[in-house]
Every structure is written in C-alpha cells, then in structure tokens.
Image (cartoon, rainbow, N blue to C red):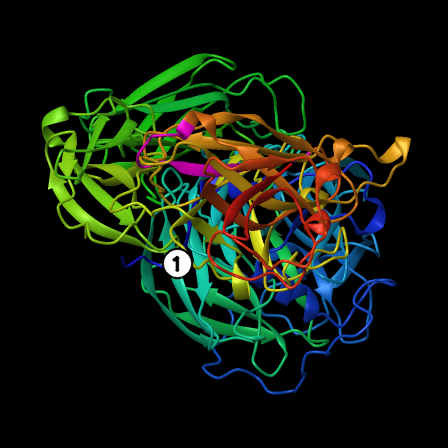
Amino acid sequence: MKHNRSLILTLTAAAAFTAAAAPHGGADAPLGTLKPQARAALQAKTYVPTGFYPSYTERPRAAVAPSRAETPDASRPWFYAIRTYHSAGYGPSFCRFKAGFSPEPKSMYTLSGDANGFAGTLTAPDSFNFADWTVNSSGGITAVNWAILNPSNGNIQRHSLQVADPLSMDMTFDATSGKIFAISAMADVLTNIDPANGDVKVVAESLPFYTLSCDQAGQLYGIAIDAAGNASLHSVNKATGASVKVGDTGVKVFTQNGYSIYQTAEFSAADGCLYWATVTPEGNGALYRVDTTDGHAAYLNVFPASESFSAMASLPLTANAGAPGAPTDIDAHGAPDASLRATISFKAPALTADGKPLESLESVAIYRGRDAEAIHTFIGPKPGEQLEFTDENAMSGFNAYRIVATNEVGASVPVYVAAFCGDDFPLAPQGLSVALGSDGVPRLTWTAPTKGVNGLGLRPDKITYTVTRNLTGTEEDLVASRLTKCEFIDAGIPLDVQAYPYYRVRAVSPSGEGLPSAPAGIYTGPAYDLPFVESFAGCVPATAPWISQSLAMGGAWELNYISSFPGTGPADDDGMLIFPCFSMAKGAEGRIASPLITFADAANPVLTFQFYYLNMESEDLIFDDGLQVEYSLDRGQTFEPVENGLFLQKNANTRWTEVSLPLKAVAGKPDVSIAFRGISDGGFNVLLDAIAIRDVPAGIVMPREELSDTDVPIYTLDGRMLRSKSLSGLPAGVYIRAGRKIIIR
C-alpha cells in the first residue's frame, strides 16, 4: 500500500499570528519569533544594544551613488523618521529630514537603546505611533511596547504588551478610514492596529512586503523584494489583502541571505508623491521617489552616514491662524444596491485653525481624488452646520474625497474620506463542509455571503466561486473557478493513496475575489492496517499524512531532534514531536493527528507512546501543560477524548516514560485517526515519541512481582528479539516468550 510521506499543516492566519509570554520566562522566554525578513534586518545592523547579538557581521558601506540620478523635486517635502542605523554607531533616534538634501537627517529625540524595529506612523500632528521590542540571540521577542511620541516635545507614552502582535515590517496611516495598516513582522498578513493601545486585528493574508504606504485617496501600496534584491511596487486591497503588481522599481537593494532589511516608504502631504527610504547593495542609505503609475523609482539622495530608517511619515500641513479648522464628523458610504453613488456627510468647522470660534465661512468644497476642480461647493454655510452631498458619478471601487473649508483668511487643512461604490468584494463564504461520497470523492458545500467587506450588499446573480486545494501544507492549487452553485465535487483526488486535502472557497464579484473561507479538510484514500508504528525517524514521518492544527493562540506541534526546555533528545535518538509550551502563551492548544487507521478487526487495541515532561518539583513551577489523546471516527471532522487519556506535567516524572492506553472506543471501527492535543499552561515543553498501536490478543496477564528472570528469548509482536531476556526490566506491553503471549502490566 502506498502512502504520501509529507507532513501536512492546516493553518489559519490568526492562529499563526498570535503569540504571548510565558509567565515564568525571564529574559530569554520569547513572546514570539520574527519572520526571516525581520531577523535579517536586525542581524544587519551596526548598532547592537549591549547583551544582544554579541557577534554579527557589519553590513558593507561604500560611497557609491545609485544610478539613474535625477534632479530632486523643487518642493522637497519634509519627513519625520525613525533612524535605526548610523555608520558611527549612534543609537536609534526620532529625526527629521528634507527629501533631496544631502545633509545628515536631524536627530530630534533619542529612543530606547535596548530596543529594535520601530515600525511606526503619524496618526495626528501630536501622535507618532510605533512599536518597539527587544529580542534574544535567536530572534525570540522578549518585550514589546506600544509607544506614542509627540513630535513637538518628545514626550513618549509607552504601553507594555503581553503579545507580539503589533510588531511590523512597516505601517501607515489611512486618513480616509482613520486606521493604521501594517505588514506583520511575525507572519505574512495585513493588519489593523489601534492607535491608542496597539491592539491588532488581522485583515487578511498578504505578500511579504517590506514597506506599506497609503496615499491621500486611501489606496495602499507595498514594495516587495526578491532574494536577489530586486524591488517591485504593488497596489494592495486594504479589505482583502490582495495585491496587483504595478511595476518594477528598477532598483536593487541590500540583501542578506536572500532577505532585505527594514526600510520604509510614505506619501508626502505636500506633493502627493511616494518616497522610499532603503539601503543600496553597497550599504548606503538612499531615498527614492516612486511613480505609482508604473513603479519606476527615481533616485534623490544618499544619506551621508549610510543612515537607514524603519519608519517615516510626512510632516502634516498647517493652516494660517484665523483660517477655518478642519470639518468634523465626516462619513462617506456607497449605495447599498451597488449603484455608482456615494454620499458624503460632515459638519462644517466651528473653530478656526488656532482654536477660536469661527464667525463665518465663505465656502466648503468637496473634491474627488486629486482633481483640482470641486465636484460640489457649499456657499456660505454656517459654522458647525451639518452638510451632505451625493456624488452621482462615482467610480467603481474606492472613491477618495477631500474637503476644504475657506474664509477670508484662507483655507483649512484638507480632510480626506473614502467610499466604496459598485460591486463590493465579498465576505468569506461560511459553513464550508467536506464529506466523502460513496465513491470516496470529496464533496464540498458552503453558504453564500450576502455582504461585502465594505458593508455593501451583493448581487447574487453576479457572484461566482473559486475553490483551492492544499495537499502539501504550503501551496494552494486552484481546482475550480466560475462556479455558480455553492457546491463542488473534487474528482481530481487520487484515491489509491491516503491524503488529507483541505480546501478554501472564495466568492468573486465583478470587482474581484473576496475573502477566503475558513479551511476545511478530510482524509481520503485507504487506511493503514494494524500494527501502526511511528517514531519520526530523521524528523520525517514514515507514515502520512499527519495533520497539525492550531486550535488556540497559535499552539502547534513541531518535529525536532532536541528540546531546549527540557534539554533532552528523542526517546529513540532519531526525532520526536514537541509541543513548545515554553515559547507559547498560556492557553495555547494544538493538535497533531495520525493518518487513518482501520480497527475493523481489532478487539483490544492499545496505544503506547513515550512521554517526557520536565517536572521541576517546585511549587512555583507546577504547570498544567500536557496532552490529551483523542480519536476521530469521521475522517478528521471531529475529535473526542480517549478515556483516561489526559497526561499533565504535574503528574509526570522527569524522564522518558512509556504510556500504555487502551482504545476501547475505536475497537471494531474503520477509518480512525488518533490525535494528540497539546495544552500549554506557559510551562515547559511536552515531548512525544515512539507511537505504536497494536491489537493486544488474549494471553497470560502477569503482574510484575510474579515475573521470572529465567534466560528465555523474548520477542515483540512484530518479531524483534529484545536484547534483554529479563521480563522484570520490560515496560508494560505485550510480548512473546516460549511461544506464549505475555501481557505485562
């Protein structure tokens, strides 16, 4: 019987994203681990805080200017930025620089010297929001803060966090929605971050961008960099995370081991152009202006001390004293029937830009996008008056509007708002279910979404569906498209080999593909016969598919040769499963499930495995970490606990211990999966090895105290002669001695 040898992983973005601290961890207990792009960024730094990265390779520096130099734009806009690298080894600082100028960026405030990263953005004139964190030598995050800096006086409010969620490659503020968008440094996901406290919401999966920027219209852009250092610009859908390549920048940047380092890009409020601070292959910090129509990047200047930056934001525009303040209570929304109409409502300003009562207004004008001509002007409205306008000529997709109030002194600072019009991007289909027909072929059903991600209704007659299948744990293959019904039969699955395909369904409107459904899978193909044995030799399963599923707070099993906590190796020296409680949050759970096994002819099946847990035998270090043995009778759709199958740290010995567990509930059942549910209480790692399931026949049951040590060969049920001929030294189990079956308890 043939079987696939790959380890299958079923993952969700949210589960992979969240990690929290172990309560006892001290300086080396990580909150989470950075993805490779972020680790490479930290290792490429010259400035290294004391106690971190005791050995590192300084990135190269050369006074070589990039090619394609261009005369800087005459406006030369100003930017705030967080400088994380200086050739003289200065620590990180909040600074200011002017595009196209060669003088060293002016440091305004020194930041914490033992922190890293500092992705951030400006959400208000007095609020530059960023995350800082400390890491250990393996890239594990040991502390995280959400910080709010006032650029006018340098005051910083810090909120200590117990999760690593807000750590980002780059972040940007969308003025049209009032949201911070970010590319996570922990996983390839697009997130929203609450400016007040750093709380994070995962929006969608995303490409592994190094920068993220939002223009005045609310459109996101990201810069991706391949292993060779070639950079390309992409537009990003802020509702679905989907991206479209705009074009190559024509710029090659610094890389280390196939990854680039922290960099940042942002739009200028002064000229509306995109500026990008990166590092050249020669190690020079450099500034480019990027054309969002074709992706081409024009070189502006090299920073004189090879500075590089992890965050930047355009200095906000200001209005003259006595000019109107900004309109307030702004809202914009598209028509719910998918027609191309947008309604914009707001209150006219009641105060001047310097905070005094506003006596009168000449006008309040609404502009679409970057148009110089207003689409509507309110003449002489009263200060504080509620105003509303419907744009009957909106475009399909996001429509950005800016609103400007004027009086005899001058104009207000523009405020921005966006409304989505037309056919919305669908929300995720719900209730995806997979079942096998009588022919063994997977049949999928789901419920159609009724609304889009921007809150608009959908036209059912305009919705189709795509179905993707994952057989490897890493790649999704498109197996169906343009489906008009909420069902699909996957006749392309080979049925002679056991597999675990899992599927996702996406609804597609005329605007594009919506959010994916939660994954759903099922075992297909023939089951294994008893006896079933798995030791994970070479850290590769000999049987397949093993299904790893995160159940809560990112908990997941992993294969390895060594566990740091405890410092031990496999029971049989060839690989083992680890549930890493030490580096996971309290409450994290994850399941690893075996391939299908048939127990149809088994009268007394027994599971044995080796279990290890570090018991510190200290009242301060007693945790309820452990595992629960489970079983599934419906090809992995649901799992039930095995009777007496809970094994906890506080009841364990500090050694490898063989566990023998009867599987009464599955006797006589076909197509069974046996699973191990890891449970983290924030303690030490759970180790699992040498899994075996056998049907134990009736035989002689012998208590240990009655065993004889006579020199008679002893065999396992699969015919292996044991080196020891002594029954008294054997673990519990079933053996053959002198032609008789012996059950040792």
Magenta stretch: give its range. 666-680
Q: Quadrant of the C terminus?
A: top right
User: As rendered, which of 744 and 706 lies closer to the eye?
Assistant: 706
Q: What percent of the width, then of the height, locates residue 640?
A: 46, 25
Asked whether 677 falls inside the magenta stretch, the response is yes
Asked whether 497 falls inside the magenta stretch, the response is no
Q: Could you tell me which secondary element the residue under label 1 belongs to?
A: loop
Q: How many marks on residues?
A: 1
The residue at which mark 1 appears reads as: 6
Q: What percent of the width, then of the height, locates residue 162?
A: 72, 36
Q: What percent of the width, then of the height, locates residue 177?
A: 46, 32
Instruction: Look at the picture and state if 60 lies above or below 20.
Output: below
Q: Is residue 727 left or right of residue 478?
A: right
Residue sitting at x 40%, y 38%:
673
User: As rendered, which of 443 and 553 lies closer to the eye?
Assistant: 443
Q: Is residue 396 left or right of residue 232?
A: left
User: As rendered, which of 442 and 397 lies closer to the eye?
Assistant: 442
Instruction: Look at the picture and state if 71 lies above or below 444.
Output: below
Residue sitting at x 76%, y 76%:
87
Q: Amino acid at mark 1?
A: Ser
Q: Is residue 13 left or right of residue 670?
A: right
Residue sitting at x 47%, y 39%:
696
Residue sitting at x 32%, y 44%:
371
Q: Quadrant of the N terminus?
A: bottom left
Q: What percent of the width, then of the height, locates residue 109?
A: 81, 53
Q: Is residue 552 visible?
A: no
Res. 400 image quadrant? top left
Q: Is residue 242 visible?
A: yes
User: As rendered, which of 489 and 224 lies closer to the eye?
Assistant: 489
